[in-house]
Image (cartoon, rainbow, N blue to C red):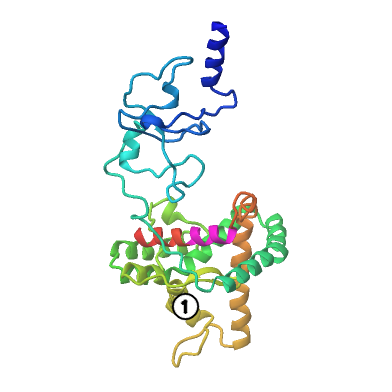
Amino acid sequence: MAEQAVREAESAVAPESSGTRPQVDSAAGIVVAQFISVTPGVCIQEVPPSVICPEDLLLGGEPAAAQPSPVVAEIKPSQAEGPGDLSRDPDAAQERDEPYDPFAKAEGTEGQIEEYDPWEPFNQAMFTFNRKLDEYVVKPVATVYDKVIPDPLEFGIRNAFHNVRFAPRFFNNLFQGKFKGAGIEVGSFLINSTIGVGGLFEPAKKVFGLETPDEDTGQTLGAYGTKPGPYIVVPILGSFTARDLGGFVVDLALDPFNWLVMPFTNINGAPQLITNEDTVLFAQLGSRAGYIVNERSLNIETTFEGVEESVVDLYGAVRNAYLQKRLKAIKQ
């Protein structure tokens, strides 16, 4: 009978095999841990000596002597990003015996962007339009183009487009006080236009080591403190902010190619290589279409490939990536 009583006492306190902790009497300040799942990675914290944890109970005996013992911390919804994930602050890191970097910046205080998108319904519609346009028109054309044009020539065409539009980059380097960058832009243009056969090759970069980040009016405005403003998705052209869209228009005006070679408007006394307005219109559209198709052929398998299945909100991911990219460009 005594042995049977001992076995019944042991079964009363033995842990279940399902991976849960048994309920413990809460009398005398003992913490109640009612079937708390043992979750790997859950943060623990120290409690006063008067608190005894379930794991300190001896099978078939009395509780161990009261001492500081770890208990499962309560996870508030505002703290957790996922199951078993606590907010990472210095005190919590010390309690988990994790190294704490005193020089690390607090989350959200550095490089934080504001995804201001008051026109989101319109932008989402334009985003979908651009994706369908790419899927049914641009990508098929670029695929055929890629099979006909060899890769070295595609890169040469990209270089030529970049070279001929050096003027906005030059002016915006000056506007930002980056005189070295402005000098590099002029030198690169002269070298690539001559030795590089009209910009098809890049000897300025590959031979002479002349390279500087591209600058535009949107970055210049940002460098002087202009806020990005609302996020905008433009048909065919893609993502902008209000600041960057205004800067894009200014960059078009800063480019002599747009008012000397293929002018958008007639300027009294200014020389014009092409004077017929219809020819200018088709030349501008053809130039833009050629640039888009050439760029798409160089990235034929990278745009959104495999991304749609791995993200919940593709539109939000693209918006965030664009804003992060622009923030980084302004800081360069």
Q: Residue 167: which quarter of the image?
A: bottom left
Measuring from the top left, give residue 118's x and y in whole percent. Answer: 50, 73
Measuring from the top left, give residue 287's x and y in whole percent. Answer: 59, 72
Q: Amino acid at mark 1?
A: Val
Q: Is residue 292 left or right of residue 91?
A: right
Measuring from the top left, give residue 124's x and y in whole percent. Answer: 60, 68
Which residue corresponds to the image point at 59% horizontal and 83% vertical from the top-left? 280
Residues in magenta?
A: 314-322
Principal SS element in the magenta part?
Answer: helix
Residue situated furthest bottom in the rendering:
268
Q: Is residue 101 left or right of residue 311?
A: left
**Does the rendering let one see residue 254?**
yes
In the image, is residue 136 above or below residue 111? below
Looking at the picture, tell me which residue is in the foreground, 262 or 310.
310
Which residue corresponds to the image point at 62% horizontal and 83% vertical from the top-left? 279
Image quarter hosting the N terminus: top right
Q: Is residue 303 left or right of residue 190?
A: right
Residue situated furthest front in the rendering:
1
In the image, is residue 201 above or below residue 283? above
Looking at the picture, tell me which residue is in the foreground, 26 or 37.
26
Label 1 element class: helix
Magenta stretch containing residue 318, yes or no? yes
Q: Is residue 307 left or right of residue 191?
A: right
Tell me the crowding category of disc 1: few under 14, some 14 to 19, or many 20 or more residues within 10 angstroms, Cα based: few
**Does the rendering let one see residue 99?**
no
Measuring from the top left, give residue 305's x and y in whole percent. Answer: 64, 52
Looking at the picture, tell me which residue is in the foreground, 207 or 43.
43
Image quarter hosting the C terminus: bottom left
Q: How many numbered marks does the figure carry?
A: 1
Looking at the picture, tell me which residue is in the foreground, 271 or 119.
119
According to the picture, the residue beneath numbered tag 1 turns out to be 249
